[in-house]
Structure formats: C-alpha cells, structure tokens
Image (cartoon, helix red, strand yellow):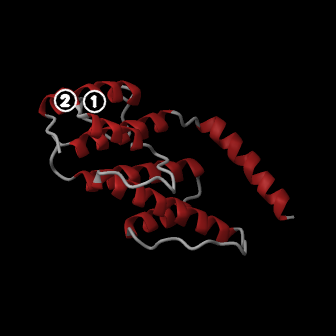
Amino acid sequence: MGSYYYLAAQLPYLVYGQTVPMSAAEFRELARDKMSSAEAAVLDFCTLDPGFSAPPTHSAFINHWREWERTLRLNLGKSRSQKLKRADTADAPEHPADAVTAAKNALALESPLDAEIFLDKARWDAIDSFQGINTFSEDAMYAYLLKLLLMERRTAFDHEEGNTEYKALYAAILGEAK
C-alpha cells in the first residue's frame, strides 16, 4: 500500500454538493503518474456502476464499495418490482444494512430527483466509511475518484429534462400495467 502525501496534499478538498474542482479523467491521469502500476490498475474499477460479475481486486476498499453498490441496486430493483406487483421479484442481500436502508428511504421520496440526490449522498457517506482516516493512502485516492464521479453525476442532473423523462417513463409503465 503506497503513501500519497504529495498527491493528496495538492488535491482540493471535496464537499458533497459543491461544483467539481477537476474532472475524474484529469484525476485519473494525475493519479496514474504517482501510483504503482498495480495500484493504478485499480483506478479502472473506480466506477459508479461496478458491475455484478467483476472479479475482486486487491483493494478491500474497492471490494467493499462494489458490494455496497450491488446491495443498493439489488434492493432498489426488488422494491421497485414489489411496487409494480411483479411476480419475478428477485432476492436482495440484507448486508451492508446501510445500503438496504438507503434503498428503502430513497424509494419513499416523492421526487425522483430528490431520491437520486439522496442516493448519491448515501454513496458519498459509504465511500467515507470505507476510506477510513488515512488521507494519504491508495484507498483515499480511490475514494477521491469515486467522489469526483458522484460530483460529475450531480452536475448532469437537469430538473426540467429529468421531470419530462420521468413523466414519459411513468406513462409508459402505466400503459404496460393496463
């Protein structure tokens, strides 16, 4: 596990909800130059969609993140299927419990935008918990990249476009249900 004092010291502090200070692509390039090849290869697993069949990495941080996100997504899917009264409701893991709770709480929100913001804040908090207190570790660099990706995702939210898309999807779902 490397130590990244110089890299971490030059990075702007990230606060959820603020604008992105640099792109995730810029950070990847900067970090790759300072990391060992094995640690830099794990940057490719720093994604908001970690996949369900990707093999484990040497990073416990990334493995925890992927398990958390997988649990969140499976619980969201299960709850949505149950809401639509579908018979094909799949089982979803019960751990990590905070991912299960985040899914339930997000689905209780009226606004899809509020639900997405809530989920991203839950993701941010999960990343913080997996990172630990060492701000100069490879895990801190992976956490930084994931947070940049969350910040970029948040800037992509367009309230009017999202509302229009939501109404169209909702109408289509109601049409299928009839």
Does residue 21 show up?
Answer: no
Q: Residues within 10 Å of mark 1 (few under 14, many from 20)?
A: many
Q: Which of marks 1 and 2 is nearer the N terminus?
A: 2
Residue 85 lies, with reference to residue 102, above or below; the image says below
Residue 160 position, x and y percent, is 64, 36
Q: Residue furthest right?
A: 178
- What residue is pinned by disc 1? 31
Residue 144 position, x and y percent, is 30, 39
Which quadrant holds residue 142? top left
**Closer to the camera, 35 or 75?**
35
Which quadrant holds residue 31? top left
**Closer to the camera, 160 or 96?**
96
* Label placed on residue 7: 2
Residue 136 position, x and y percent, is 15, 40
Name the residue rendered at 38%, 39% in the picture: 17
Q: What residue type is labelled 2?
A: Leu
Which quadrant holds residue 13? top left
Residue 95 lies, with reference to residue 3, above or below; the image says below
Does residue 109 show up?
Answer: yes
Q: What residue type is labelled 1?
A: Ala
Residue 77 lies, with reference to residue 82, above or below; the image says above
Name the residue rendered at 83%, 59% in the picture: 176
Left or right of 49 on screen, residue 3: left
**Closer to the camera, 175 or 81?**
81
